[in-house]
């Protein structure tokens, strides 16, 4: 009879990772959270489409319309950055009905000696639009009557001092949404890791697992499995968001948008590697779900602080606070993507921030692995880190 085959460390890590993925895919909380995030994202896209679908169109009803009046209204609309749709109405009664039904923003009674404009409530915009068109048409008619037919006016050349301002605003908005998504997913998957550790300790499943593998293999498998799941989730969300924004023409800079989304995903990988390790180590110090919040609360506060600084970095990407925190491991995943979108961040700054994060991850994994190994089999209450380190030795 052949001896049972001993699995390699890589195979054991893969088994744990596959187990974590399978368990979470059957977890109602994970499924609900994923659906909620996608619904919120689709809702935001729908809201943007709904808001933007009619904001550049103004419907004006006209009684006694003429080709000259229609041209004047459309020319005035171009000046006010709106597309004017002229609706022909038969009489004043029809005009009042159209305004009350909100089929038009205003109705001009142009067939009278003194034109009148009917509106539901005065907001100034429709009055300026129609008043400007009527005045323009009246002046043109008076000049023509005086024998002045050459009414050509020189075009005013427009020079934008900051032609990329709108694109920058879109990139900043995308980065802020990405930071909010990063914050949500880091907390969500960090809690998944922590809850899994405590559940295994409370049910003594961990004792069976450690009979066949080492603590670091179990820790690596957990982080890898949930990390793959988290990465797949954020890629899916980013794909839906970017695809929807481009398909519905919500953004004008798809290239920059995709670059910002890729940056957010890359920083998620680094942030998750750091926080998942810390959450797992913190959870190994307790044996009950009731005690879990006490050890992970400081981590959630750090994440919240990083998110707040990231939001502030959008308005002042070169400020001292934003620059310093974008290099601090743990805060940089939430601050640096916003700085990259909002300002001109040098390549060396990004490189330094990434290197510091990698060093932090390596230190946390090394030290955290020792704490995790020393605390994993100890139950009965909260364990101090020094005790866990001593036990591991």
Image (cartoon, helix red, strand yellow):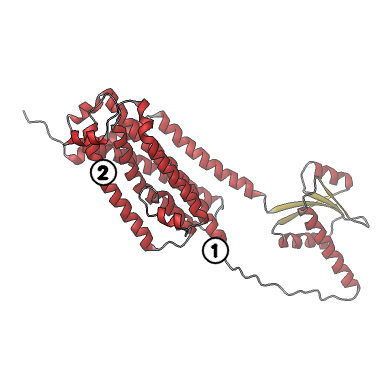
Q: Does any portion of residue 265 appear in the rendered image?
A: no
The CA span between labels 1 and 2 is: 42 Å
Q: Which quadrant is the N terminus positioned in?
A: top left
Query: What residue do we see at 12% from left, 34% from top?
Result: 5
Q: Which residue is mark 2?
A: 365
Query: What residue do we see at 34% from left, 55% from top?
Result: 354
Q: Nearer the viewer, residue 258 or 178?
A: 178
Query: What residue do we see at 32% from left, 54% from top?
Result: 356
Q: Nearer the viewer, residue 203 or 119?
A: 203
Q: Which residue is mark 1?
A: 164
Q: Is residue 285 above or below residue 175?
A: above
Q: What x and y, as percent, mark residue 191?
A: 37, 35
Q: What x and y, as percent, mark residue 318?
A: 47, 60
Q: Is residue 310 above or below residue 372?
A: below
Q: What x and y, as percent, mark residue 390?
A: 19, 35
SS under mark 1: loop
Disc with the residue nearer the chain's start (1 vs 2) = 1
| Residue 150 falls in image quadrant | bottom right
Judge left or right: residue 321 versus residue 81: left
Query: What residue do we see at 68% from left, 54% from top?
Result: 56
Q: What x and y, as percent, mark residue 333?
A: 39, 50
Q: Does any portion of residue 391 appear in the rendered image?
A: yes
């Amino acid at each position: 009879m052949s001896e049972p085959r001993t699995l390699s460390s890589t195979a054991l890590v893969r088994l744990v990772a596959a187990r974590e993925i399978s368990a979470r895919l059957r977890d109602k909380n994970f499924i609900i959270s994923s659906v909620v995030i996608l619904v919120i994202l689709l809702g935001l896209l729908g809201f943007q489409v709904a808001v933007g679908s009619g904001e550049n169109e103004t419907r004006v009803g006209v009684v006694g319309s003429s080709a000259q009046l229609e041209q004047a209204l459309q020319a005035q609309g171009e000046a006010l950055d709106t597309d004017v749709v002229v609706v022909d109405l038969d009489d004043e009664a029809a005009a009042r009905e159209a305004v009350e039904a909100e089929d038009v923003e205003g109705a001009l009674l142009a067939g009278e000696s003194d034109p009148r404009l009917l509106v539901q409530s005065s907001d100034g915009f429709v009055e300026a639009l129609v008043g400007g068109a009527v005045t323009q048409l009246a002046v043109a008619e008076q000049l023509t009557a005086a024998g002045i037919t050459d009414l050509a006016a020189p075009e005013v050349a427009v020079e934008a001092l900051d032609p990329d301002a709108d694109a920058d605003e879109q990139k900043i908005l995308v980065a802020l949404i990405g930071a909010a998504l990063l914050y949500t997913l880091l907390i969500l998957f960090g809690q998944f890791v922590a809850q899994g550790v405590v559940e295994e300790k409370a049910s003594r499943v961990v004792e069976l697992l450690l009979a066949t593998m080492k603590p670091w293999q179990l820790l690596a498998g957990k982080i890898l499995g949930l990390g793959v799941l988290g990465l797949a989730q954020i890629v899916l969300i980013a794909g839906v968001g970017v695809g929807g924004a481009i398909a519905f023409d919500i953004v004008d800079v798809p290239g920059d948008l995709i670059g910002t989304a890729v940056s957010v995903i890359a920083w998620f990988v680094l942030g998750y590697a750091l926080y998942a390790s810390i959450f797992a180590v913190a959870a190994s110090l307790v044996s009950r779900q009731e005690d879990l919040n006490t050890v992970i609360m400081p981590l959630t506060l750090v994440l919240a602080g990083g998110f707040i600084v990231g939001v502030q970095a959008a308005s002042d990407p070169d400020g001292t606070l934003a620059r310093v925190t974008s290099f601090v491991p743990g805060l940089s995943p939430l601050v640096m993507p916003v700085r990259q979108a909002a300002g001109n961040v040098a390549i060396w700054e990004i490189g330094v921030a990434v290197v510091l994060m990698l060093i932090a991850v390596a230190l946390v994994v090394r030290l955290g692995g020792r704490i995790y190994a020393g605390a994993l089999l100890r139950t009965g209450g909260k364990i101090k880190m020094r005790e866990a380190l001593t036990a591991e030795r």
